[in-house]
Amino acid sequence: MILAALALWQALFVLAGPDAIASPLTTLQRLIALGYDPRFWTNTAATLAAFAYACVLSIVIGLPLGVAVGAHKLARGVVEPMLAALYSIPKITLYPVILLIFGLGLSAKVAFGVIHGVFPIALFAIGAIRNLSPSLLRTARILHLSPRQTAASVIMPAALPEILTGLRIGVAAALLGTIIGELFASSQGLGFMLIRAMENHQVADIMAVTLFLFIIAGIANAALLAIEHRLQWT
C-alpha cells in the first residue's frame, strides 16, 4: 500500500512537474532539512499543544453528551437530528464567529479543533447506544442498577467498539480543525508554516509539512487502534 502510494505520488510528479508538486525524494530531503531548524519544532510544539487541548475537550464534551442523549429515547429523537445538522454545516462558515469570540492565538485554534472533533464523537456514541440490545437495559433495570452503574457496567462495555471508532474519527477531525485554525487564526504552528509556504509558492515546504502532518495523524490513529485492541482483549 505504501509502495503504491509512493508510485502514484511519483507519477503525479512526472505528470504535473516540480512547479505543482515535489517528488517523494525531494519532499523527504526537505523534511529532514526542516528537522534541523529550531523554528520547525517550535511550530510543531504549538500545533501539538493545540491539538492535545482540542482532543481532550472534544472527548470530555462529546462522549458524555453522546452517552446521555443516547440513553434516553426522547432526548435522542430531539437532540440527535440537531447534532447531525450542526455537523453537516461547513465549519468555515463559523470561523468569523470563532475569531470574534476567541481572537487570534491558541484559544481560536483549540475552538476550531473542538467544533470539528466533538460532533463525530457524540454522534457515534449516540449511535452505539441506540444499537444496543434492549435486553441489556432490561437486565440493568431488573438488577436495580443506578443510571451511573448502568452506564459504567452495561452501556459502555457493550457500546465500546463503536464509541472508539467515533473517537478515532473525532481525533482526526480535531487535527484537521486545528490545522485549519492555524491557517486563519495563528502566527505559529504547522498550519501557519503551510500557509506561508503556499503564499511564497515553496512547493517542497508545502509537501514536507503536509507529509509531516500525515505522520502525526498516522501516529495518533495507530495509538488509538492499539488502545482499542487492548480494551477489546481485556
Image: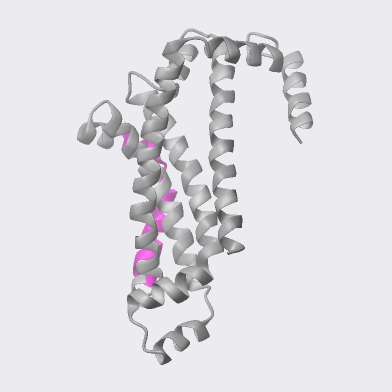
Frontmost residue, 72 versus 220: 220
What residue is shown at x 44% (from left), y 12% (from top)?
38
Frontmost residue, 186 versus 136: 136
Query: Which image quadrant is residue 133 in?
Result: bottom right
Residue 145: image location, x then y, percent: 37, 84
Q: Is residue 221 left or right of residue 57?
A: right
- In terms of secondary structure, what is the magenta stretch mainly? helix
Residue 193: image location, x then y, percent: 44, 17
Residue 172: image location, x then y, percent: 50, 42
What residue is shown at x 54% (from left), y 32% (from top)?
216
Residue 192: image location, x then y, percent: 41, 19
Is 41 part of what is drawn in magenta? Answer: no
What residue is shown at x 57% (from left), y 55% (from top)?
228
- The number of numbered discs placed on residues in the rendered structure image is 0
Q: Is residue 104 above or below residue 55?
A: above
Q: Is residue 193 above or below residue 139?
A: above
Span of residues in magenta: 76-95
Q: Is residue 27 visible?
A: yes
Q: Is residue 141 above or below residue 21?
A: below
Q: Is residue 21 visible?
A: no
Frontmost residue, 11 versus 143: 143
